[in-house]
Amino acid sequence: MKKWIVLFLLLEGVVGYAVEYKTRLVVGITIDQFYPEWLTMYRNDLREGGLRRLMQQGKKVMADYDYLYTQTGVDQASIYTGVLPVEHGIISHDWYDRLRKRRENNVKTRDFSEIGESFAAGYAPVQLQAMTLGCAMKKENIFSKVYSIAMNPEDAVLSGGTCADMAFWFNENSGTWVSSDFYADSLPAWLKNYNAVVESDFFIRRGWMPLAEEENSTTSLKFKNKLGGRNSFFYDIMQAKRKFDTYRVLKATPYANTLVEQLAEKLIAETSLGRDNDADLLALTFSALDYMNRDFGVYAREFRDMVLRLDRDLEKLFDLLDTKVGKENYTVFLTFSEARELLPEELSEMRIQGGYFSIFKSVALLKSYMSLVYGEGDWIADYDAGQIYLDRELVERNHISLKEMQDKVADFMIEFEGVSKVLTAYSLTRNAFSHGSEMLMQNAYSQKRSGDVLFCLQPAWVPDLKDREDNYFRYSKRNKVPLYFYGAGINAPLSGECRIADILPTLCQIMGITPPYTAKGKALFQ
């Protein structure tokens, strides 16, 4: 009898530990193109319940993406799979498909259609080659719910992964929230009703001026702001909407984050996330003025206002979680994707010489050089921000050594100002690099999807863009970013650094579930 009592007490202790460690809802937050130093710069302006709450009551560690260039979408895939681009397959916004001889987007697909609007473009995680946090949760418990929300489809789709109940993103033509028939045949009834209100129009009419002045000023003062009569700013979003005939203009304002937060509130209420003992996941992506990110310096009033408004949005979200889910029943992690770098003009103020590297001009010169060396021909099949694709069929037809041509391209590219390192696909597939930019390039390299030559820029140089809305050639060289944990299960100190791949196994540990066998990271709370 004593034997059974002892066994019962031991089992009770194990169960008690599991319950103590388990969370009902994981809320993952990534902020695109954010300058992490803003958290320090505007610390005194933050409210107690928003970002300051994470900074003061949560645990912070510096996380290393561990690959060369970080991009939105790519980073979300890395966070939620726990593996590097070389394994999960999302190496960039787009890549050149040698078999089909065309660019492939990381989420856009012809096999699925958008639901909620009658547009042909469809998005789905069909290019993702690894299991996600949502898959681990669903495998452990089929009653777990997995949702993701973002303004851009790639962020929503790659955060939710292949096992998500649904991923929602913003339709720029209608100003409403949509999804893909990869997840369901139609939008849920509650979202159809929500879309009927079209919250976007409210913000379109509102215009954008500093938060403090918006709250304190009179109608006449707002009018003066609009006319430029004060040392402030006012953006007439309605006028921009009329000019460009798209709701995309909202993405360049802090209201984009408010729209994400408001939908998150509605989703939590309608789906009862975190209301039972089946752990759920809500993945959210916010942004720092999206395609307008380079239009302002890091000290600009627009960025300060964006930070303060995001802070209030997060405060609202956390208050809702406290009320609906319970303070001890949810876990939050917050980190940054494609973190903002200082631009050359900002670095020049510190007497640091940098510049904008134009891949377009470089490749134009490279094409001329290749024609002189190997004869006329379209030797360059495609290129992106950090890699160059050769037309391998043309190379083979002309009986030219692929390695030789890769070396020629590498030798030519290294001569450009701003380029610090160039590696060929041949060297990346035949060597194992253990440190430095070579290792970072190798971690981002896919033998099937990456180019023949990869290059990286010097620290003070950034890629030139076609235009302000160019995402294809936009990326960040900031590999290390702050990572905050807060809430249930975060009961041990953190220090030093970790890898971004460690987020997934850490959350699995907190939920008491087994990580996907494909995950490479390790749990941080031992």
Image (cartoon, rainbow, N blue to C red):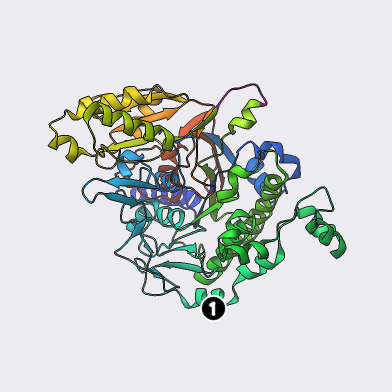
Residue 429 visible in the snapshot: yes
Q: Which residue is at 32% across, 34% downward? A: 367
Quick one: 102 or 219, which is closer to the camera?
102
Left or right, 396 with reference to 351: left
Which residue is denoted by mark 1 in the rendering? 193
Quick one: 382 or 272, which is closer to the camera?
382
Q: Secondary structure at mark 1?
A: helix
Which region is colored magenta? 349-354
Q: Position of residue 451 (x, y in %)?
A: 30, 37
Q: Which residue is at 60% across, 38% downward? A: 36
Q: Position of residue 474 (x, y in %)?
A: 48, 42
Q: Is residue 286 above or below residue 345?
A: below
Q: Is residue 171 above or below residue 51?
A: below
Residue 56: quadrant of the picture: top right
Q: Which residue is at 28% across, 34% downward? A: 452
Q: Is residue 347 above or below residue 60?
A: above
Left or right, 43 with reference to 496: right
Residue type marked 1 = Asn
Quick one: 482 or 354, which is closer to the camera?
354
Q: Is residue 17 above or below residue 399?
A: below
Q: Which residue is at 23% across, 51% downward? A: 100
